[in-house]
Amino acid sequence: GAVVSQHPSRVICKSGTSVKIECRSLDFQATTMFWYRQFPKKSLMLMATSNEGSKATYEQGVEKDKFLINHASLTLSTLTVTSAHPEDSSFYICSARDPRVGGDTQYFGPGTRLTVL
Amino acid sequence: AQSVTQLDSQVPVFEEAPVELRCNYSSSVSVYLFWYVQYPNQGLQLLLKYLSGSTLVKGINGFEAEFNKSQTSFHLRKPSVHISDTAEYFCAVIGSGNTGKLIFGQGTTLQVKP
């Protein structure tokens, strides 16, 4: 299957700082990427849909000013957690839709573990 | 709108035994169905998917799933599990015309014991 990478794999930061997470599709161009958040022992919660060249679409209850998403190119989307607080600590996972594959199939990155102290 | 229910939160099974992880969905439109596996502290890996055609779908690592439209189910099966299959398994659905958003079930933890 297609390969999606995320960087960094884990990050620890102080409360009040901002953290940027990168999501890249390595062997295909993705016009659409998705950002998810996963709490321990829980399923994935869709945060937003990132479309190349346009503004991201956020799910209800997700603060767009808190979680800034930029889809700068067909292979890169970034999620910036601004003014992070301990409650933002979580596992963040991105996915990218491969247009070469039917069924709107999404391929997932390895995730980023964010810990805010 | 679509929804997915994974009926078992945990499934313990002995090595080399068969396993079935259950998934039911609800949707008023046609759907695409997926099974993903997540190993600890990792992202999700696509196991298999049903888009159309044959209702029996074979995936990676010896897994297969059967789409049953009348029962709105997409159960995942493996005839003989290994210790390495211990992981979290997620069933997911995309409804046609749903902007490609995956709707996930709650997940099932498969625990393979020696």
Image: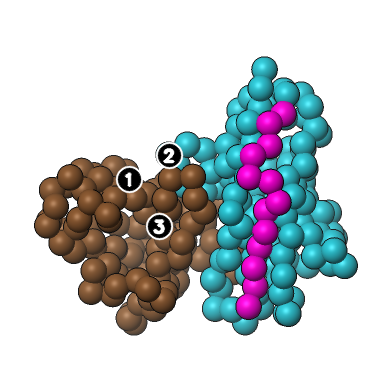
Chain colours: A brown, B cyan
Nearer to me, B18 or B58: B18
**Image: magenta residue range:** B1-13
Q: Amino acid at mark 1?
A: Arg
Q: Which residue is drawn at the image coordinates 36% and 57% (left, top)?
A: A24
Q: Return the chain for callout 2.
A: B
Residue B102, given in percent of the width and then of the height, sits at 56, 66
Q: CA distance from mark 1 to mark 2?
A: 8 Å
Residue highlighted by disc 3: A37
Depicted A113 relative to depicted A80: above or below:
above
**Whether labels 3 and 1 share one chain:** yes
Q: Quadrant of the N terminus of chain B?
A: bottom right
Residue B1 in the figure: left or right of residue B58: left
Depicted B20 relative to depicted B91: above or below:
above
Residue highlighted by disc 2: B41
Q: Return the chain for callout 1.
A: A
Q: CA distance from mark 3 to mark 1?
A: 10 Å
Q: Amino acid at mark 2?
A: Asn
